[in-house]
Image (tube, rainbow, N blue to C red):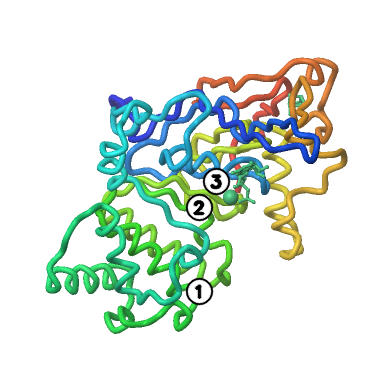
Amino acid sequence: MADKMPALVELRELDKVFESRKGLFGGSRKMTAVSQVTLDIPRGQVTGVVGESGCGKSTLARLALRLLEATSGRVVFDGVDLRGLSHQEMRRQRRRMQMVFQDPYSSIDPRYRVADALLEPFKVQGLKLSAGAARSKVEALLAMVGLDRKLGESHPHQLSGGQRQRVGIARALALEPDFLVLDEPTASLDVSIQAQIITLLERLKRELGLTYLFISHDLGLVRYFCDRIVVMYLGRIVEILPHPKARPRHPYTQTLLDSTFAPDPTRRREIGQLSGEIPSPFDLPPGCAFAARCTYADARCRSERPRLETSADDHETACFNPNLSPQNRETP
Ligand SMILES: Nc1ncnc2c1ncn2[C@@H]1O[C@H](COP(=O)(O)OP(=O)(O)OP(=O)(O)O)[C@@H](O)[C@H]1O
Ligand code: SF4
Ligand SMILES: [Mg+2]
């Protein structure tokens, strides 16, 4: 095997605890949205993160970009530990790491023209561009994402969902980053438009040598697009598939996969037909958090928490009873 380059992003034992007020009588309750997440995001690859709504995907994304401060743990970006950086150093570092949201325009002033939105990252960084340089930058960014240069004068409400997402991607690329976090970038788009955006992201990655962290609750999409798949359940990584066709070994991922191939497409987004309650994130059980929904749960699962273990083929699973049967190696 060739020497492994260090990963572009290294997440180490990240925890994020949110505290919320209990109500009139004060006090607070804590919930761990991300727990003990250790993950390498290799250069030039697409690392996918899947899991149900609320399992901590966006929180993890924000921690990876240090848009949110971790309760504990660290993020190392291209060899630099982000924890110790000053505000200014962090701002400089942030040029190299950007995020694309599900609806990138939701956070932008609707009076902004597309051109203003594309130039905003320069303003945030305190970078001044001449009028000519700004115009050519906007045109180059629009061309890069396959949009007509005339759209620079448009306002968000004049664009289709697909065009808006292209603008969101162009905006993320404005400062020539190395790393993009894509947080459900196609979740609100029609399937055909979704495919176009994925094709665009594939081309940009190839042409610009980008590294992606791609977040989705659609395992089918993640299996198509990603090189490696991280599965989260209630704030923890429960499985890492070393390649997209690897057969899941964790019962939760198997359920996710079954729901991906559900014959009725309207059911595909609902994850599994599971019995048992999802435990409250405010009050997690002592053992495996999936035990109440798992057909293979035994006494050990209810008292002890399984750790993420790596097997010889680089497959990581946090389960006492993983499915290792030989016919379970590859999926179609
Ligand atoms: N700022 C916050 N304050 C308190 N709780 C939060 C905050 N942000 C997220 N949470 C909680 O943390 C948990 C994880 O949320 P997160 O948004 O990371 O999930 P997600 O996997 O991205 O979900 P979705 O698929 O719906 O986007 C949720 O229970 C959420 O309510
Ligand atoms: S550890 Fe036990 S309860 Fe948890 S997923 Fe594995 S078999 Fe199921
Ligand atoms: Mg989210």
Whether ligand 3 has any atom under 8 Å from the Cβ at mark 2 is answered as: yes
**Left or right: where does residue 316 sit relative to residue 4?**
right
Q: Position of residue 190 (x, y in %)?
A: 57, 72
- Give the residue at x 77% y 20%: 286
What is the secondary structure assignment of the residue under circle 1? helix
Identify the residue under disc 2. 183
Real-space Cα distance between discs 1 and 3?
21 Å
Real-space Cα distance between discs 2 and 1?
16 Å
Q: What numbered label is drawn on residue 87? A: none
Toward which corner of the image does residue 156 lie, by quadrant?
A: bottom left
Q: Earlier in the sequence, mark 2 or mark 1?
A: 1
Toward which corner of the image does residue 49 lie, by quadrant?
A: top right
- Residues under numbered marks 2 and 3 in contact, where contact means CB atoms less than 8 Å apart: yes
Crowd band around label 3 with a 10 angstrom C-alpha radius: few (<14), some (14–19), many (20+): many
Q: Position of residue 293 (x, y in %)?
A: 82, 36
Q: Earlier in the sequence, mark 1 or mark 3?
A: 3
Residue situated in front as seen by the camera: 293 or 150: 150
Real-space Cα distance between discs 2 and 3?
7 Å
Q: What numbered label is drawn on residue 161? A: 1
- Residues under numbered marks 2 and 1 in contact, where contact means CB atoms less than 8 Å apart: no
Query: Measured along the vertical axis of the image, is residue 98 above or below residue 276?
Result: below
What is the secondary structure assignment of the residue under circle 3? helix
